[in-house]
Image: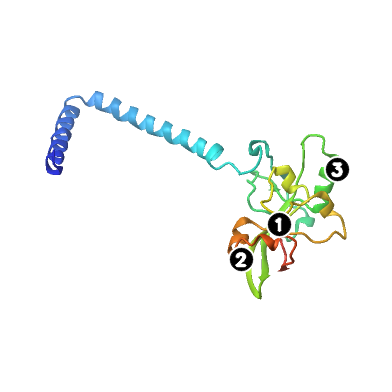
Amino acid sequence: MDTLGWIETLVQDLRYALRMMRRSPGFTSVAVLSLALAIGANTAIFSLIDAVMLRMLPVSHAEQLVLLSWAAPKWGPYYHGYSGWGGCPDTPGMASGCSFSYLTFQEIRARNEVFSEVLAFAPGRVNVLVNQHADFEEAESVSGDYFSTLGVRPILGRGLTQQDDRPGADPVVVISYGLWLRRFGRDPSIVGKSIWINGPLLP
């Protein structure tokens, strides 16, 4: 059957279907409602799968990760100028957030009796100087147990450890695959070299 014949057949079928739907409005309503419910259910299931499985963080046991937050009846004077991470849902009628001071993080980690590990991170932007070319890059200041807790292993070199958290420890940076590809051409000899990072890690 050629294309024109196929279109004519489709038009005839549609006309027949419309005539039958006019003759049985009750059946038509049930069919449309059933179709709408089926589409709605499939959309809801896909949204759940998309959120839980397809967009799962690429780390070990992502379903076990918990983001700590705090809530208080009102903002205190010590919150003046507060600018924390904005990815935390608000608590209705309360002052709330997901950001803690580093001293608070250390206290939580020292007194932890609930979680297998506790890590800290602070996202921001830094100015990275490579081969006399400077540019802004996304960055995170993280605690030494960040990579071990997430079960992430670097392709080259090593991740951070709690020894890197010690006062006076040599500064260490772990670069992303994208930065390694974009700024260093996937040069494997980059491990152990120094790069210049100038700027605050906090936004």
Asked whether 38 or 96 is in front, the reply is 38
Place of residue 143 in the rendered image (x, y in percent of width and height, measured from the top left): 77, 51
Amino acid under disc 2: Arg
Residues marked 1 and 2 touching at CB (< 8 Å): no
Judged left or right of residue 61, residue 50 is left
Asked whether 125 or 97 is in front, the reply is 125
**Residue lying at 14% horizontally and 34% vertically, measured from the top left:** 15
Element carrying mark 1:
loop
Above or below: residue 90 compared with residue 27 = below
Element carrying mark 3:
helix
Does residue 73 show up?
A: no
Which one is earlier in the sequence, the residue at label 2 or at label 3? 3
Asked whether 132 or 28 is in front, the reply is 132
Q: For mark 2, does the 10 Å Cα neighbourhood hold few (<14), some (14 to 19), or many (20 or more) residues?
A: some
Amino acid under disc 1: Val
Numbered disc in front, either 2 or 3:
2
Does residue 61 show up?
A: yes
**Residue lying at 73% horizontally and 61% vertically, measured from the top left:** 81
**Residue lying at 66% horizontally and 76% vertically, measured from the top left:** 132
Q: Quadrant of residue 34?
A: top left
Tell me the residue that label 2 is attached to. 183
**Which of the image's four quarters has the N terminus?**
top left
Place of residue 25 in the rendered image (x, y in percent of width and height, measured from the top left): 22, 26
Tell me the residue that label 1 is attached to. 174
Judged left or right of residue 142, residue 7 is left
Amino acid under disc 3: Ala
Residues marked 1 and 3 touching at CB (< 8 Å): no
